[in-house]
């Protein structure tokens, strides 16, 4: 049995939000029965509940929904991520075009890019854009080495060659080849070139809590914090599934598993397909509006955003450092990554769920980052965290990794009434909102409830083929040697740890 730890490190997003929903139980006792059980209260669970509401708001009756969360509401990956709404506009194109062809690669990219306008439209319609700190603009990939610049430039030029300068998405990307201009735009010391594209940022935890509040006001959602699901049955002959929890049993017509890394806890067939990877972030005090654009720094294929497909499932391809700055009155810089330090001990993050622990030396690393990496840093040296280290100043969190890099979205094969949306591989922000819009009709079909597609989803792309959960995909991936991938990832990271940029004073391993 795999469940998240009870006492995770404290995240800035959660502590600073001070939400009244954090430990909410809508009712003292669990209902005896419901139409839909949603296991997990993060981005996936909340948006699925939202779409179930929107698809049925014209009905005389909407589905009864019960959302069960093992810890506090949205206390998992969504409450611990980097806040970047940052599609892969071009950087994965060479790899994806090799696997799916130019049009197939573009299908995935356009689905991700559509999340920018989808977020704006939804948050504007519900009146929560300011509350959730939504901001759209440009982001950058900053090349900090010739290796990185060769790779980033190649990705941009390959997509440009295949689709032309007026091609979808690529026409809105830009390249900065002059190092001085790249430094000015990115604010990154030593940047030798950059690629720029559209992106956004949001306070993920506030977004989810605002959405849940709206659903509880307008629909039939019962929210239950600190209620772990320990077992789910198959659907019986009468159409009921029994959900066993730490507080009693509930029977339901259908179950959505919105558990991401923890999917195999209730669906053991995914034990070799979805894994945990631990990441880390910090919040740093900064002057209002100091950071002009969200962005990421890149060094090599490990301390970088691009990885070979054979290694991707275990290391998530986290860039060295990635950051945003929140608007007033918060003004905090949220920075994550730290791979030049972490890469010396791959076991500390690969297949590691210990989000109750800080990485050794990582608070000091982040405090050194602004003066070391940002041009004209005006703040304290070392930088001051926005909160005390263990009160939301620095935290860790568990992301999921999918064995083939893509999420699993759809009905669980040979398990009637069960649906899954998980395995987002540290890249859920520009994938989940429209993925859950595609799963909501499947759930409603399963319980025999009529629905009408809301205007919000009418113009957006359908679910990309690589995301779809099929029996063929499941069987094929269950034959992959996950252990060999894991061992290769560890060796690959240890090789990267020998590079000079992983051995400056701040990146050398610290004793515990």
Image (cartoon, helix red, strand yellow):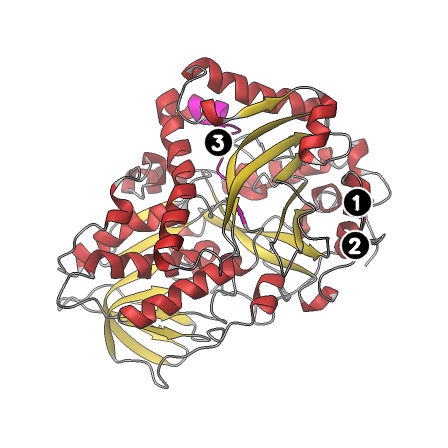
Mark number for residue 361?
2
Q: Residue at x 69, y 23 (%)?
A: 147
Q: Which residue is mark 1?
A: 377
Label 2, label 3: how many angstroms apart (C-alpha)?
A: 33 Å
Q: Which of pointers 2 and 1 indicates the residue nearer the eye?
A: 1
Sequence-wise, the earlier of marks 3 and 1 is 3
Please state the horizontal and vertical placement of residue 177, each as a whole percent of the image.
66, 19
Please state the horizontal and vertical placement of residue 229, each as a whole percent of the image.
39, 70
Q: Secondary structure at mark 2?
A: loop
Mark number for residue 89?
3
Question: Which residue reaches farthest bottom?
Answer: 28
Label 2, label 1: how many angstroms apart (C-alpha)?
A: 22 Å
Q: Which of pointers 2 and 3 indicates the residue nearer the eye?
A: 3
- Badge 1: residue crowd in 10 Å (few <14, some 14–19, many ≥20): some
- Badge 3: residue crowd in 10 Å (few <14, some 14–19, many ≥20): many
Residue 94 inside the magenta-drawn segment:
yes
Q: Residue at x 28, y 46 (%)?
A: 457
Comparing 160 with 299, the one in front is: 160
The answer to whether one can see residue 351 in this image is: yes
């Amino acid at each position: 049995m795999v469940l998240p730890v009870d006492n995770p490190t404290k995240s800035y997003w959660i502590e600073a939000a001070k939400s009244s929903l954090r430990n909410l139980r809508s009712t003292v006792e669990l209902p005896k029965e419901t139409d839909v059980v949603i296991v997990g209260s993060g981005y996936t669970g909340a948006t699925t509940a939202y779409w179930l509401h929107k698809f049925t708001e014209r009905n005389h009756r909407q589905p009864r929904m019960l959302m069960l969360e093992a810890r506090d509401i949205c206390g998992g990956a969504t409450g611990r991520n980097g806040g970047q709404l940052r599609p892969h506009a071009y950087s994965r194109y060479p790899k994806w075009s090799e696997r799916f062809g130019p049009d197939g690669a573009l299908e995935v990219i356009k689905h991700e890019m559509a999340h920018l306008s989808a977020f704006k439209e939804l948050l504007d319609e519900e009146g929560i854009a300011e509350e959730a700190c939504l901001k759209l603009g440009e982001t950058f990939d900053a090349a900090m080495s010739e290796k990185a610049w060769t790779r980033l430039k190649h990705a941009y030029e390959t997509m440009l060659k295949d689709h032309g300068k007026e091609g979808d998405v690529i026409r809105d990307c830009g390249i900065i080849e002059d190092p001085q201009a790249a430094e000015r735009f990115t604010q990154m010391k030593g940047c030798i070139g950059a690629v720029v594209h559209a992106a956004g940022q949001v306070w993920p935890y506030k977004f989810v809590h605002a959405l849940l509040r709206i659903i509880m006001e307008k629909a039939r959602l019962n929210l239950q914090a600190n209620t772990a699901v320990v077992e789910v049955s198959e659907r019986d002959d009468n159409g009921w599934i029994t959900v066993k929890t730490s507080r009693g049993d509930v029977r339901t017509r259908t179950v959505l598993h919105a558990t991401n890394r923890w999917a195999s806890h209730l669906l053991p067939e995914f034990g070799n397909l979805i894994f945990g990877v631990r990441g880390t972030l910090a919040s740093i005090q900064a002057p209002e509006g100091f950071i002009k654009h969200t962005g990421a720094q890149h060094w090599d294929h490990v301390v970088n955003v691009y990885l070979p497909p054979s290694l991707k499932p275990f290391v998530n391809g986290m860039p060295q450092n990635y950051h945003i700055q929140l608007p007033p009155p918060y003004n905090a810089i949220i920075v994550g990554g730290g791979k030049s330090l972490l890469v010396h001990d791959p076991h500390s993050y690969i297949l590691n769920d210990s989000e109750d622990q800080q990485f050794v030396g990582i608070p000091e690393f982040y405090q050194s980052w602004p003066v070391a990496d940002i041009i004209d840093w005006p703040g304290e040296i070392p930088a001051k965290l926005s909160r005390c280290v263990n009160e939301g100043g620095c935290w860790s969190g568990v992301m999921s990794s999918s064995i083939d890099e893509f999420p699993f979205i759809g009905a669980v094969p040979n398990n009637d009434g069960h649906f899954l949306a998980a395995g987002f591989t540290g890249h859920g922000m520009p994938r989940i909102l429209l993925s859950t819009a595609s799963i909501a009709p499947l759930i409603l079909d399963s319980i025999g409830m009529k629905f009408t597609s809301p205007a919000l989803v009418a113009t957006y792309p359908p679910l990309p083929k690589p995301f779809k959960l099929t029996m063929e995909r499941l069987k094929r991936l269950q034959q992959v040697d996950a252990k060999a991938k894991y061992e290769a990832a560890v060796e690959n990271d240890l090789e990267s740890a020998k590079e000079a940029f992983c051995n400056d004073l701040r990146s050398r391993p610290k004793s515990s």
